[in-house]
Image (spheres, rainbow, N blue to C red):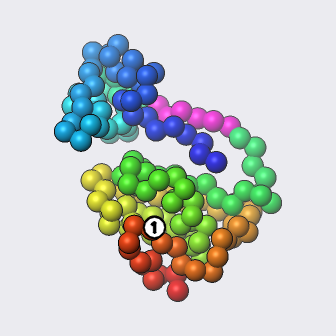
Amino acid sequence: LKLTTDHTPERKDEKARIKRSGGFVAWNSLGQPLVNGRLAMTRSIGDLDLKASGVIAEPETKRIMLNHGDDGFLVLTTDGVNFTVNSQEICDCVGQAPGPADAARVLADQAIQFGAEDNSTAVVVPFGAWGKYKASDVGFSFSRGLASSGRWA
């Protein structure tokens, strides 16, 4: 279950806030929208020089009820990870890992191998159903022609 929507300049509400604050959205040569032509996200803890242009550090939050018998984990990633590894790949990788630290390390490593150009950080929080839904005993592959890192063998 994906709990968030990325805070990008493509979102109408985020783009409107940027424009109201005097910022602008420009597209790079790859067709990616960027705040003031340089930041792919509209919310950031850093990037202090863009705060006057509508970039904020306030997160969107959501409350959900957890069922520790059914819910296996929560994954928090930076945009360096989720711009290069999609949500399903993240879940598949975490579901195959023997532990949360291994899962976080492999996610960050894979993002870097796939060309992440931003910080790549992952935090994996295990819940009561950790390991309950393993799809197979075969090590995870991101199916991009790369073999598993071998760390889980």
Side (left or right) of 126 relative to 31: right
Q: Quadrant of residue 128?
A: bottom right
Percent across and percent down for residue 122 are 46, 58
Viewer-closest of 4 and 33: 33
Q: Quadrant of residue 147?
A: bottom left
Viewer-closest of 109 and 29: 29
Give the residue displayed 60% in from the left and 76% down from the top.
Answer: 98
Residue assigned mark 1: 142
Side (left or right) of 30 relative to 5: left
Percent across and percent down for residue 110 are 39, 66
Side (left or right) of 117 relative to 13: left
Q: Residues within 10 Å of mark 1 (few under 14, many from 20)?
A: some
The stretch in magenta equals 58-63
Residue 47 visible within the image:
no
Name the amino acid, label 1.
Answer: Phe
Give the residue displayed 55% in from the left and 40% down from the top.
Answer: 4
Percent across and percent down for residue 15 are 37, 22
Q: Decide: is 9 above or below 132.
A: above
Percent across and percent down for residue 124 are 55, 60
Is residue 94 located in the magenta-colored stretch of the structure? no
Name the residue at the bottom extreme.
153
Give the residue displayed 47% in from the left and 31% down from the top.
Answer: 58
The image shows a total of numbered marks equal to: 1
Residue 77 visible within the image:
yes
Q: Secondary structure at mark 1?
A: loop
Side (left or right) of 150 relative to 128: left
Magenta stretch prevailing secondary structure: loop
Give the residue displayed 35% in from the left and 13% down from the top.
Answer: 20
